[in-house]
Amino acid sequence: MSTANTPSLHVTSSAPIANWGDHDHAGHVVQFYGEDGFLLDELCRFIGTALGAGDVAVVIATEEHRDGLTKRLQACGLDTAGIIAQKRYVLLDAAETLAKIMLRGMPDEARFAAVVGREVEKVTAAAKSEAPHVAAFGEMVALLWADGKPEAAIRLEQLWNELARTHSFFLRCAYPMADFCREEHGAMLLKICDEHSDVIPGESYTALVSHDERVRSIAHLQQRAQALENEIAERTRVEEKLRRSHADLESVVEQRTAALRQLSSRLLSLQDSERRRIARELHDSLGQYLVALKLDVDILRRFPEREELWSQCDELLERCINEVRTLSYLLHPPTMDAVGIASAARWYVEGFGLRSGLKLTLEAPDDPVRLPDAIELALFRILQEALTNVHRHSGASEAKIVIRRAPGQVILEVMDNGRGMEPGLLNHFRETGAGTGVGLMSMHERARELGGKFQIESDASGASMRVTIPVPSDCATSVA
């Protein structure tokens, strides 16, 4: 085909390619586009000019773009079927060709040379002129970019440049601008441009004909870029403000959580103080009244009539005295104030065993060393709660209680032979520190308040509860 038959391609463009013969035939141009129509018009101009001049072309594109290019070339008067038959025009599928040159996720130099280099050599050999010019178009790089492999796309651009050292061709690559829609894409776009000798911008700029229009467009783009930078800076400031607000909110939550814990500790302390006050009241008032009443009954017994009634009254009054004494001891055993936790625990375990029917054993130290009042009271309350749980929930027949001192700490253990805790409940307690009732939470909170640890182990053979509370060395006192 002679140059007289070169199609007239009336596409207005400020791109680097104006006429096929006016440019270095070893150039590497990248074209960015918004609409496929713009890409195909420019590509028709590029490839059509070469083929119309009797030169050769290699197109590696998607099926849609290959078909669109063929229709445009034919509309311009080119016999594409005849040119293909002359082997001056090679059409390759971008995805299939890309698959042939990839190795472990990256374009391979040897495979690229064997596949793409061979096609360039073949089409060069089919040229009519002694110094043939080869026009090449490829969008394999665009497929890599769209697939989230920017480094592979850059490497493929470099392989094209390396091939140009041994083969003469003019190459054009293309990327849709829609794939560069994020701020972080800017740096990679510049890297892509660095691998090319020329850049064809998108149609929003290329379609501008006059110098004045282009200058105005550049100014407008600069204004938009500055506005975008300002918006990003403002968004960054807002995000930083939100982060600070979030941090402040977390601080408030932590403070209120600490306040709730202090309130919980205070409530427990008030509860213990109230129990102690009630114990004194029961012992000093109601207990004394009941004793006086018993004395009055003894005087009345001197009268012979209704002897059986007086006997019943005497028995009931004796029970009242015993119940009041037991209640008083349960609220706050006076033996703990006098001789400490070990004595109070022995009294309580013995009485609880009689009342519950459980077989209980206690191992506790006989040494006269006293613990701080807060620790002894916490151990006693935890012991009460633990045995109550064993009696109500475990189905156990036996339980063992151990109170022992270790360097810097005191340890309370309660072990039973019951059915154990349900795995779901046990896991929930370990993860959150909360149980289904107040018992576990109360024991956990008492231990935590004193800097201690509360642990539970359970299996089919029973459950064990362990409380470890640190004891400052300067807080122990001895009983004379």
Image (cartoon, rainbow, N blue to C red):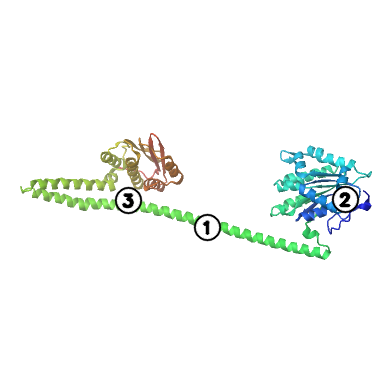
**Of the image marks 1 and 2, the number of the one nearer the N terminus:** 2
Identity, as a three-letter code, of the amino acid under mark 2: Leu
Image quarter of residue 229: bottom right
Residue located 60% across and 60% down the image = 238
The residue wearing badge 2 is: 78
> Can residue 462 be seen at all in this image of the molecule?
yes
Q: Residues within 10 Å of mark 2 (few under 14, many from 20)?
A: many
Task: Identify whether 277 is placed above or below 112.
Answer: below
Q: Is 72 on the left-hand or right-hand side of 267?
A: right
Please state the horizontal and vertical placement of residue 307, each as a whole percent of the image: 8, 46
Identity, as a three-letter code, of the amino acid under mark 3: Asp
Q: Is 148 on the left-hand or right-hand side of 37?
A: left
Please state the horizontal and vertical placement of residue 269, each as a whole percent of the image: 35, 52
Instruction: Kindly identify which numbered label has been placed on residue 272.
Output: 3
Residue located 51% across and 57% down the image = 249
Dot 3 lies on which element? Answer: helix
Q: Residues within 10 Å of mark 1 (few under 14, many from 20)?
A: few
Instruction: Kindly identify which numbered label has been placed on residue 381.
Output: none
